[in-house]
Protein backbone atom coordinates (compact mmCIF):
# COMPACT_ATOMS: atom_id res chain seq x y z
CA UNK A 1 0.00 0.00 0.00
CA UNK A 2 1.42 3.39 -0.94
CA UNK A 3 1.74 6.31 1.49
CA UNK A 4 -1.26 8.03 -0.12
CA UNK A 5 -3.50 5.08 0.68
CA UNK A 6 -2.70 4.52 4.34
CA UNK A 7 -5.54 3.84 6.73
CA UNK A 8 -5.78 7.48 7.85
CA UNK A 9 -5.84 8.72 4.24
CA UNK A 10 -8.59 6.26 3.30
CA UNK A 11 -10.71 7.20 6.34
CA UNK A 12 -10.31 10.89 5.51
CA UNK A 13 -11.24 10.36 1.85
CA UNK A 14 -14.29 8.22 2.67
CA UNK A 15 -15.33 10.70 5.36
CA UNK A 16 -15.25 13.59 2.91
CA UNK A 17 -17.22 11.66 0.32
CA UNK A 18 -19.90 10.55 2.77
CA UNK A 19 -20.08 14.10 4.20
CA UNK A 20 -20.67 15.59 0.74
CA UNK A 21 -23.37 13.01 -0.04
CA UNK A 22 -25.43 14.13 2.93
CA UNK A 23 -26.32 17.64 1.79
CA UNK A 24 -29.53 16.16 0.49
CA UNK A 25 -33.30 16.71 0.68
CA UNK A 26 -32.74 20.02 2.49
CA UNK A 27 -30.77 18.42 5.36
CA UNK A 28 -27.10 18.61 6.32
CA UNK A 29 -24.87 15.70 7.51
CA UNK A 30 -25.46 16.33 11.26
CA UNK A 31 -29.22 16.37 10.72
CA UNK A 32 -29.12 13.08 8.79
CA UNK A 33 -26.94 11.48 11.46
CA UNK A 34 -29.33 12.69 14.18
CA UNK A 35 -32.25 11.02 12.35
CA UNK A 36 -30.29 7.75 12.03
CA UNK A 37 -29.30 7.87 15.68
CA UNK A 38 -32.83 8.54 16.95
CA UNK A 39 -34.15 5.64 14.83
CA UNK A 40 -31.78 3.32 16.75
CA UNK A 41 -31.54 4.89 20.23
CA UNK A 42 -32.98 3.05 23.23
CA UNK A 43 -35.11 4.56 26.01
CA UNK A 44 -32.06 5.87 27.91
CA UNK A 45 -30.45 7.45 24.89
CA UNK A 46 -33.03 9.52 22.97
CA UNK A 47 -32.19 12.74 24.81
CA UNK A 48 -30.51 15.92 23.52
CA UNK A 49 -27.51 15.23 25.80
CA UNK A 50 -27.00 11.69 24.48
CA UNK A 51 -27.43 12.92 20.90
CA UNK A 52 -24.76 15.59 21.48
CA UNK A 53 -22.39 12.90 22.82
CA UNK A 54 -23.06 10.64 19.86
CA UNK A 55 -22.45 13.41 17.33
CA UNK A 56 -19.45 14.74 19.27
CA UNK A 57 -20.86 18.28 19.36
CA UNK A 58 -21.79 20.76 22.09
CA UNK A 59 -25.24 21.02 23.66
CA UNK A 60 -25.68 24.40 21.96
CA UNK A 61 -24.93 22.97 18.52
CA UNK A 62 -27.16 19.95 19.03
CA UNK A 63 -29.94 22.27 20.09
CA UNK A 64 -29.73 23.99 16.67
CA UNK A 65 -29.87 20.59 14.95
CA UNK A 66 -32.95 19.57 16.94
CA UNK A 67 -34.69 22.90 16.27
CA UNK A 68 -34.04 22.49 12.52
CA UNK A 69 -35.42 18.93 12.52
CA UNK A 70 -38.47 20.00 14.55
CA UNK A 71 -39.18 22.86 12.17
CA UNK A 72 -39.16 20.38 9.26
CA UNK A 73 -41.60 18.12 11.13
CA UNK A 74 -39.09 15.24 11.36
CA UNK A 75 -38.52 15.13 15.14
CA UNK A 76 -40.67 15.92 18.14
CA UNK A 77 -39.84 16.55 21.83
CA UNK A 78 -41.76 14.59 24.44
CA UNK A 79 -41.65 15.62 28.10
CA UNK A 80 -40.75 12.46 30.01
CA UNK A 81 -41.44 13.40 33.64
CA UNK A 82 -44.21 15.23 35.49
CA UNK A 83 -41.76 18.07 36.25
CA UNK A 84 -41.35 18.48 32.49
CA UNK A 85 -37.56 18.68 32.71
CA UNK A 86 -36.68 15.36 31.09
CA UNK A 87 -36.88 15.63 27.30
CA UNK A 88 -37.16 12.59 25.06
CA UNK A 89 -36.73 12.97 21.30
CA UNK A 90 -38.83 10.95 18.86
CA UNK A 91 -38.90 10.66 15.11
CA UNK A 92 -42.21 11.59 13.53
CA UNK A 93 -43.70 9.43 10.79
CA UNK A 94 -42.22 11.93 8.30
CA UNK A 95 -38.79 11.45 9.89
CA UNK A 96 -39.02 7.67 9.64
CA UNK A 97 -40.25 7.87 6.04
CA UNK A 98 -37.41 10.21 5.09
CA UNK A 99 -34.84 7.68 6.32
CA UNK A 100 -36.01 5.38 3.50
CA UNK A 101 -34.20 7.81 1.18
CA UNK A 102 -31.06 8.09 3.33
CA UNK A 103 -28.31 9.39 0.99
CA UNK A 104 -25.78 7.03 2.63
CA UNK A 105 -27.58 3.99 1.26
CA UNK A 106 -25.36 4.37 -1.81
CA UNK A 107 -22.38 3.48 0.42
CA UNK A 108 -24.03 0.17 1.33
CA UNK A 109 -24.83 -0.38 -2.34
CA UNK A 110 -21.21 0.33 -3.28
CA UNK A 111 -20.26 -2.35 -0.73
CA UNK A 112 -21.64 -4.80 -3.27
CA UNK A 113 -18.27 -4.55 -5.03
CA UNK A 114 -16.81 -6.64 -2.16
CA UNK A 115 -17.26 -10.32 -1.45
CA UNK A 116 -19.29 -11.21 1.66
CA UNK A 117 -16.07 -12.14 3.48
CA UNK A 118 -14.40 -8.84 2.51
CA UNK A 119 -17.44 -6.84 3.64
CA UNK A 120 -17.64 -8.66 6.99
CA UNK A 121 -13.90 -8.23 7.59
CA UNK A 122 -14.14 -4.51 6.70
CA UNK A 123 -17.03 -3.96 9.11
CA UNK A 124 -15.21 -5.82 11.90
CA UNK A 125 -12.02 -3.85 11.28
CA UNK A 126 -13.80 -0.50 11.14
CA UNK A 127 -15.65 -1.26 14.38
CA UNK A 128 -12.34 -2.04 16.08
CA UNK A 129 -10.84 1.16 14.72
CA UNK A 130 -13.82 3.21 15.95
CA UNK A 131 -13.64 1.61 19.43
CA UNK A 132 -9.90 2.28 19.66
CA UNK A 133 -10.31 5.93 18.63
CA UNK A 134 -13.20 6.43 21.09
CA UNK A 135 -11.04 5.04 23.92
CA UNK A 136 -8.04 7.10 22.87
CA UNK A 137 -10.08 10.30 22.78
CA UNK A 138 -12.23 9.51 25.85
CA UNK A 139 -15.37 9.57 23.73
CA UNK A 140 -18.46 7.55 24.70
CA UNK A 141 -18.45 4.53 22.39
CA UNK A 142 -22.18 3.66 22.44
CA UNK A 143 -23.18 0.10 21.66
CA UNK A 144 -25.94 -2.49 22.01
CA UNK A 145 -27.04 -4.65 24.96
CA UNK A 146 -25.66 -7.89 23.56
CA UNK A 147 -22.09 -6.57 23.91
CA UNK A 148 -22.60 -4.70 27.21
CA UNK A 149 -21.33 -5.73 30.65
CA UNK A 150 -24.57 -4.44 32.24
CA UNK A 151 -26.74 -6.99 30.41
CA UNK A 152 -28.09 -9.55 32.88
CA UNK A 153 -30.33 -12.53 32.29
CA UNK A 154 -31.52 -12.92 35.90
CA UNK A 155 -35.15 -11.92 36.61
CA UNK A 156 -35.52 -8.19 37.02
CA UNK A 157 -35.84 -7.12 40.68
CA UNK A 158 -38.65 -4.73 39.66
CA UNK A 159 -40.56 -7.53 37.95
CA UNK A 160 -42.01 -6.97 34.50
CA UNK A 161 -40.98 -8.86 31.37
CA UNK A 162 -39.11 -12.12 31.21
CA UNK A 163 -35.61 -12.59 29.92
CA UNK A 164 -32.90 -9.94 29.85
CA UNK A 165 -32.69 -6.83 31.92
CA UNK A 166 -30.34 -3.91 32.33
CA UNK A 167 -28.26 -4.31 35.49
CA UNK A 168 -27.44 -0.59 35.49
CA UNK A 169 -31.03 0.67 35.32
CA UNK A 170 -32.45 -2.50 36.93
CA UNK A 171 -35.21 -2.59 34.34
CA UNK A 172 -36.49 -5.28 32.02
CA UNK A 173 -35.49 -5.12 28.38
CA UNK A 174 -37.82 -6.14 25.58
CA UNK A 175 -36.37 -8.19 22.75
CA UNK A 176 -36.52 -5.19 20.41
CA UNK A 177 -34.47 -3.14 22.94
CA UNK A 178 -31.47 -5.43 22.61
CA UNK A 179 -30.39 -4.12 19.22
CA UNK A 180 -30.82 -0.43 20.03
CA UNK A 181 -27.95 1.99 20.69
CA UNK A 182 -27.31 2.92 24.30
CA UNK A 183 -25.44 5.87 25.78
CA UNK A 184 -24.74 3.83 28.95
CA UNK A 185 -23.14 0.96 27.03
CA UNK A 186 -20.02 -0.46 28.60
CA UNK A 187 -17.93 -2.95 26.70
CA UNK A 188 -16.23 -5.85 28.43
CA UNK A 189 -12.67 -4.99 29.57
S1 LIG B 1 -27.55 -3.47 29.22
FE1 LIG B 1 -26.03 -1.90 28.68
S2 LIG B 1 -26.56 -1.31 26.58
FE2 LIG B 1 -28.33 -2.37 27.45
S3 LIG B 1 -29.65 -0.77 28.32
FE3 LIG B 1 -28.29 -1.48 29.99
S4 LIG B 1 -26.51 -0.11 29.93
FE4 LIG B 1 -27.58 0.12 27.99
Image (cartoon, rainbow, N blue to C red):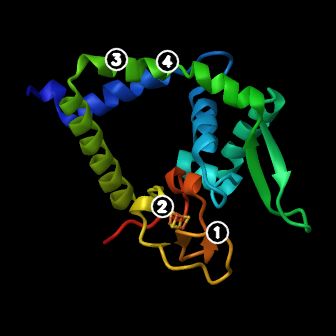
In this view of the protein, which residue sits in the foreground, 142 or 132? 142
Whether tag 3 and tag 2 are in contact, CB under 8 A, the answer is: no
Q: Is mark 1 within 8 Å of ligand 1?
A: no
Instruction: Say which element carries label 1.
Output: loop
Examine the rendered structure and indicate whether residue 184 appears above or below residue 55. Answer: below
How many residues crowd around disc 2 within 10 Å: few (fewer than 14), some, or many (20 or more)?
many
Q: Are marks 1 and 2 in contact (CB under 8 Å)?
A: no
Give the alpha-carbon distance from disc 1 to disc 3, as whole Å.
41 Å
Specify whether tag 3 is near ligand 1 (CB below 8 Å): no
Task: Name which residue lies at 25% across and 16% down.
Answer: 113
Q: Secondary structure at mark 4?
A: helix
Quarter of the rendering occupied by the C terminus: bottom left
- Give the mark toward the camera: 3 or 4: 3
Q: Identify the residue position indicated by label 4 in the image.
A: 21
* Mark 4 or mark 1: whose residue is earlier in sequence: 4
Residue 102 visible in the snapshot:
yes
Q: Secondary structure at mark 2?
A: helix
Mark before the other along the chain sequence, 2 or 4: 4
Give the CA distance from mark 1 to mark 2.
16 Å
Dot 1 or dot 3, earlier in sequence? 3
Q: What's the CA distance linking mark 3 and mark 4? A: 13 Å
Q: Is mark 4 within 8 Å of ligand 1?
A: no
- As helix, strand or loop, the secondary structure at mark 3 comes to helix
Task: Tell me the mark number nearer the camera, choosing from 2 and 4.
Answer: 2
113 on left or right of 154 = left
Query: For residue 161, which numbered disc appears in the image?
Result: 1
Give the foreground label among 4 and 1: 1
Q: Is residue 76 left or right of residue 59?
A: right
For image coordinates 83% across by 30% down, the residue present is: 71
Which of pointers 3 and 2 lies earlier in the amino acid sequence?
3
Q: Nearer the viewer, residue 59 or 121?
A: 121
Amino acid sequence: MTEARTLAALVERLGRMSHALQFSTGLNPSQWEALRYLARANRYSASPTALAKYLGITKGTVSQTIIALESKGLVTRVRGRPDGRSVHLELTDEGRNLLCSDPLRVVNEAGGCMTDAEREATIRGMNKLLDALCQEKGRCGFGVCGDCTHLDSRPCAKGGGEGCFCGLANESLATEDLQKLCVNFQSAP
